[in-house]
Image: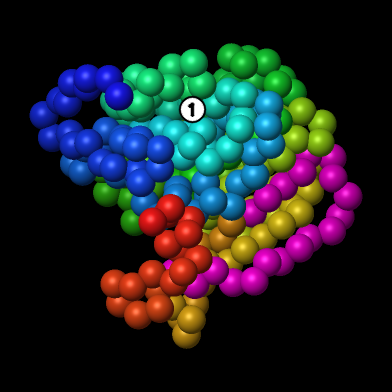
Amino acid sequence: MNQVMLLPGERLDDLQRNGYKIIQNPEKFCFGMDAVLLSGFAKVKPGEKVIDLGTGTGIIPILLEAKSKGEHFFGLEIQPESADMATRSVAYNGLQDKISIVTGDLKDAAKTFGASSFDVVTSNPPYMTKDHGLVNSGDAKTIARHEIYCNLEDLVTNTAKLLKPGGRCYFVHRPFRLVEILSLMSQYGIEPKRMQLVYPYVDKEPNMVLIEGLRGGKSRLTVEKPLIVYERPGVYTPEIYDIYGY
């Protein structure tokens, strides 16, 4: 591991994988369970090229590098502060040869990286529409949670542009937008192939959905068994402990 310079308000968190750590600032935004679950749901094959759209502090590329044998991982982030933290985390973990963080807008991604240039696209996008409980549109947490810089259609259209024919995408989102997500994926030539609902407790409603899509795939959707997060308050189910790597 390399030396790291932490700026005021930042902290270094242990990822429980390969000794990797990540720089975060609780005042800005910290990754949540949804990003970890997406890294467990996504499948990256040996030699594949991967991009994470809206990577924040780089949590998904770092976890996917730890869990897979992908050739190279890119993280695209529009907020310079978050991209800077991600870049420093990559350097701290000595992963500069495997992970590249790029500051930019996902709506320009096909121009930046080239169309049909990725085997896998991942994203943990903002869940809320622009007008849903919006308080401060310039706040880093608000930008991460609300569709300030991009909406769901922007995400899906640009994912379709970036994926090679037969390439796969993996999203985590909220179930209340599931119809919209599946409709947009089909509209832009990404066939939903696999889906898993995430429940906080076995007797509660699902609060997350994980989706895999295939560019140019045939119509056939597999719904996996539900993923339950907690056995009881403060105690994860074995499946969650496995995903986290404990």
Compared across the picture, whether 61 is left or right of 219 comes to left
Q: Is residue 212 visible?
A: yes
| Residue 150 magenta-highlighted | no
Using the rendered view, name the quadrant where residue 25 is placed. top left
On-image quarter of the N terminus: top left
In this rendered view, identify the residue nearer to me: 60 or 155: 60
Asked if 195 appears above or below 145 in the picture, the reply is below
How far from the left and from the top, in percent, is residue 111? 63, 15
Residue sitting at 22 percent across and 20 percent down?
A: 3
Compared across the picture, whether 160 is left or right of 92 comes to right
Residue sitting at 69 percent across and 36 percent down?
A: 45
Element type where label 1 sits in the image: strand
Q: Is residue 159 visible?
A: no
Residue sitting at 18 percent across and 37 percent down?
A: 11
Using the rendered view, name the quadrant where residue 246 is placed. bottom left
> What residue did someone put label 1 on?
75
Asked if 173 appears above or below 201 in the picture, the reply is above
Residue sitting at 35 percent across and 35 percent down?
A: 20
Compared across the picture, whether 153 is left or right of 22 comes to right
Label 1 is placed on what type of residue?
A: Gly
- In the rendered structure, which segment of residues is drawn in magenta? 211-229
How far from the left and from the top, in percent, is residue 182? 70, 55
